[in-house]
Image (spheres, grey):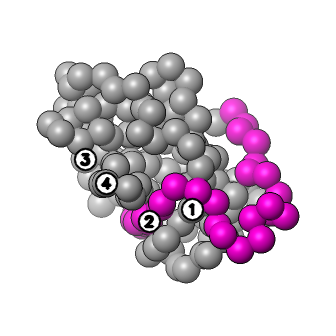
Amino acid sequence: MKFLRGVGVVCLLSFSLAGAARADGSAFAGQWRQLTSTAGRCDQCYIGIVRHGDLLTVTSNNGWQAVMNVENFLDLELAAGTGQWKSTGAGAYGGKHFGIQFVRRGPELQMFMVVSQATGRPLSIRATFERGLPATNWRHQPAPIEMQRI
């Protein structure tokens, strides 16, 4: 029941942003390295965000991807949408769908993800990113996973 309430809050936020002015998403596009996460430390985690008109696609190197809309709300540029963890190699999150939001705060990108646990209860994951790839040996890392249809 709490999960449905959480989904309802995300939907309300999405609807409330529907009337806000459209943004172009350029503040989000690019590669971002993870600085912090409530899901655990990962010095080699990063995401790539690509703009496709009014939509953004996000691909992570640790097994998830999402599609988002970008909106301006007051003086903030926000991106919100849905995604899915890859069904293999993502541990407890494997194959699970989630809601996701990003907001720019100065040079940092803050993420808020809500994914359903095995019990059906929602789990929120917060992370902070900065532009660029992880500094250690990034040239020898595999390219981000390719976008799959979700």
Answer above or below: position of 109 versus 120.
above
Of the numbered discs 4 and 1, the one sitting upstream in the chain is 1
Eye-nearest disc, 2 or 1: 1
Residue wearing tag 3:
9
Eye-nearest disc, 4 or 1: 4
Give the CA separation, mark 1 to mark 3. 28 Å
Front residue of 147 and 129: 129
Q: What amino acid is found at the position of numbered circle 2 in the picture?
A: Ala
Q: What amino acid is found at the position of numbered circle 1 in the picture?
A: Arg
Percent x, y of residue 92: 63, 70
Q: Residue at x 34, y 49 (%)?
A: 104
Secondary structure of the residue carrying tag 4 is: loop
**Position of residue 148 in the picture relative to residue 127 (left or right):** right
- Marks 4/3 in contact by CB < 8 Å: the verdict is no
Of the numbered discs 2 and 1, the one sitting upstream in the chain is 1
**Position of residue 38 in the picture relative to residue 51 (left or right):** left
Any part of residue 34 in sight: yes
Q: Residues within 10 Å of mark 3 (few under 14, many from 20)?
A: few
Residue wearing tag 1:
33
Secondary structure of the residue carrying tag 3 is: helix
Tell me if residue 131 is in the magenta stretch.
yes
Give the CA separation, mark 4 to mark 2. 15 Å
Q: What amino acid is found at the position of numbered circle 3 in the picture?
A: Val
Q: Quadrant of the C terminus?
A: top right
Residue 10: image quadrant is top left
- Marks 3/2 in contact by CB < 8 Å: the verdict is no
Of the numbered discs 3 and 2, the one sitting upstream in the chain is 3
Residue wearing tag 2:
127
